[in-house]
Amino acid sequence: MDAVKTQRNLAIASSVLLLHVGAVWALQSGLVRRAVEAVVPETIMAVLIEPEPPQVVTPPKPVEPPKALPQPVARKVAPLPPPAPAPMPVAKPAPEPAPEAPTAAATQVALAPIAQPVAQAAPPAPPAAPVVVAKAAPAAAVELPSTDADYLQNPKPAYPAISRKLREQGQVLVDVLIGTDGNAQQAKVKASSGFDRLDAAALATVQRWRYVPGKKGGVATAMWFSVPINFVLE
């Protein structure tokens, strides 16, 4: 039994080997290719030809009738005024008759001298009175009041202690009405220093001072006078 199986296996192996050898030989000799070519059917190429689309004919556009051109409007011409009437001829006046020649008697009367009255000469006009021009009186000289006289002995303005401590300083301009006796009648602050204490001290000072009164034409006159008071820390 073992020998039979062995022979059978050898026979199968031999047949398989022969089949492979035959296949290789067939491939090399081209037999297989020819058999394939004989078996594969030919491919038929079919091309569908589409029919051409029908051409659409566009109807022609209707021709528009020509537009009527605007007719020129005839302008009315104003009638010309009638011609002016021709001037009528003016009849010339008849010539006046020539004057008759004067007679000899009339000529003698006309040549007779006519006595005319002699005009008397007018009396001479009186001489004009001299014009007197009034001269303006010279302006009276004005002397302003003053505080510079040595005999006045005006004291210096008192510096407020609080202002000195707070370092307040500045100038106060005071208007003073000075009477004929040299005393201050009124006083008012014209320009402030910016500090009320300094302004009050300046008013009190100028009201205590004495002044040289102002004069007009050499006569003492009451006048307003501006007095500057300076507060400066040393």
Image (cartoon, rainbow, N blue to C red):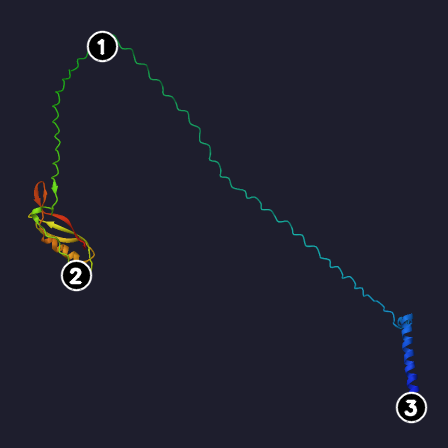
Q: Residue at label 3?
A: 2
Q: Which residue is mark 2?
A: 162
Name the one closer to the observer, 64 or 180: 180
Percent position of residue 119, x then y: 15, 17
Quadrant showing the C terminus? bottom left
Identity of the residue furthest to the top in this view: 104
Q: Circle 1 is placed at which residue position? A: 111
Q: Which kind of residue does numbered mark 2 sit on?
A: Ile
Query: Quadrant of residue 132 in the image?
Result: top left
Give above or below for 153 relative to 117: below
Q: Nearer the viewer, mark 2 or mark 1?
A: 2
Distance from Cα at disc 2 to Cα at disc 3? 152 Å
Q: Which quarter of the rendering shows the N terminus?
A: bottom right
Question: Left or right: where does residue 2 sit relative to residue 218?
Answer: right
Q: State which tag comes first along the sequence, 2 or 3.
A: 3
> What amino acid type should be assigned to the residue bearing mark 1?
Leu
Residue 217: image location, x then y, percent: 9, 40
Q: Secondary structure at mark 3?
A: helix
